[in-house]
Amino acid sequence: MENVVIITDSSCDLPEEIIKQYPIKVMTMPVSVKDNPDMDISHLTLKEFYDAMRKGKIQPTTSQVVVSAFMQCFEECINNGQTPIVLGLSSKLTSSYESALLAKENLKFKDAVIIDTKCASLGLGLVVLKAAKMAKEGRSISEITEEITHYALHMEHIFTVDSLEHLRRGGRISAAQAFVGGLLNIKPILHFVDGAIHPLEKVRGRKNVVKRMVEIMAQRVKNPENQVIGISHGDNEELAMELAEAIKKEFNVKDIIISWVGPVVGSHSGPGTVALFFQNA
């Protein structure tokens, strides 16, 4: 039986209690303060992190997992007789994927599997969780790789933010798109297309954004009763719970994971974000 370990990064937003149950190793993706990289924010709780962003006390920025970190991780896998499957943040949002490929090449570690999930936050987390469950069941590398590649490809990311300014600052959307989203009482809905962020539509008011996200899910979801649904939020638990209740009411969903959007993704999406993840095929 192959000794498979799932390598991911701290953008996956899986709850710690879930991570502990499975063969998952989380690589730290650095978060620092723009214009003050020496400022230590590691001690902040997620609530404090988002409060500081709201008050303009910090403007966080992120960087990729470096090649040397992956090389050290792979060397540990080799020493422990483990075969890693690397499932990280979308290559459209970070260079960590390229770092993992270089580390594999440098070590001539041909058994390492590196997949560009084109996912983020709990969308990535759900992919990691599925892979880890398969690894724990003793499934082979080839079985996990084939199933997870399809699973990641069909992971929908539908989300709303309080302000598009954070995405604009990070270069994830254009200034024009940010301006339109900033109009009075307009809530933008965005989605992922091939691992990159694209505006989907605009709705007026908080109540309508939940209704519309559920309608979009109804149009795109496949067999919701047989899959795990993910919801993550950037200090907006009330709206996340409202969305979860609406989904339970609309679909025969058995399993919903709700988590915070961590600092890696939250640095770009900002406070108030609510994101929905599900399979479309």
Image (cartoon, grey):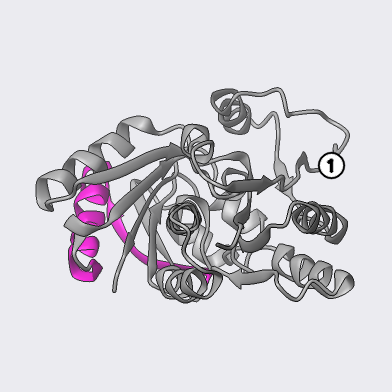
Local SS, label 1: loop
Residue 100 location, quadrant: bottom right
Q: Amino acid at mark 1?
A: Asp
Looking at the rendered image, the quarter that the N terminus falls into is bottom right
In the image, 129 versus 2, the foreground residue is 2
Q: Nearer the viewer, residue 220 or 114?
A: 114
Left or right of 281, for residue 92: right
Residue of label 1: 35
| 231 w.r.t. 111: above or below | above
Answer with the quarter of the image where residue 107 lies.
Answer: bottom right
Q: Give the residues drawn in magenta, as a range.
A: 195-221
Give the tally of numbered discs: 1
Indicate whether residue 189 is drawn in magenta.
Answer: no
In terms of image quadrants, where is residue 51?
top right
Res 171 seen here: no
Q: Where does residue 232 sit, x and y in percent of width and height?
A: 42, 43
Q: Is residue 57 left or right of residue 257?
A: right
Q: Where residue 184 sits in the image (x, y, percent)?
A: 37, 47
In this rendering, the answer to whether 60 lies above or below 113 is above
Residue that protrudes farthest toward the front in the picture: 1
Q: Position of residue 22 (x, y in %)?
A: 51, 44
Which one is nearer the viewer's eye here, 49 or 64?
64
**Which quadrant of the figure contains the C terminus?**
bottom left
Can residue 159 be seen in the rendering of this structure?
A: yes
Q: Residue at x 32, y 65 (%)?
A: 279
Q: Identify the residue at image location x=49%, y=38%.
A: 21
Q: Position of residue 128 (x, y in %)?
A: 50, 55
Q: Which residue is located at x 59 percent, y 63 percent? A: 2
User: From the viewer's perspective, is 252 left or right of 19?
Assistant: left
Disc 1 crowd rating (10 Å Cα; few below 14, some 14-19, many 20+) is few
- Judge whether 173 appears above or below 181 on screen: below
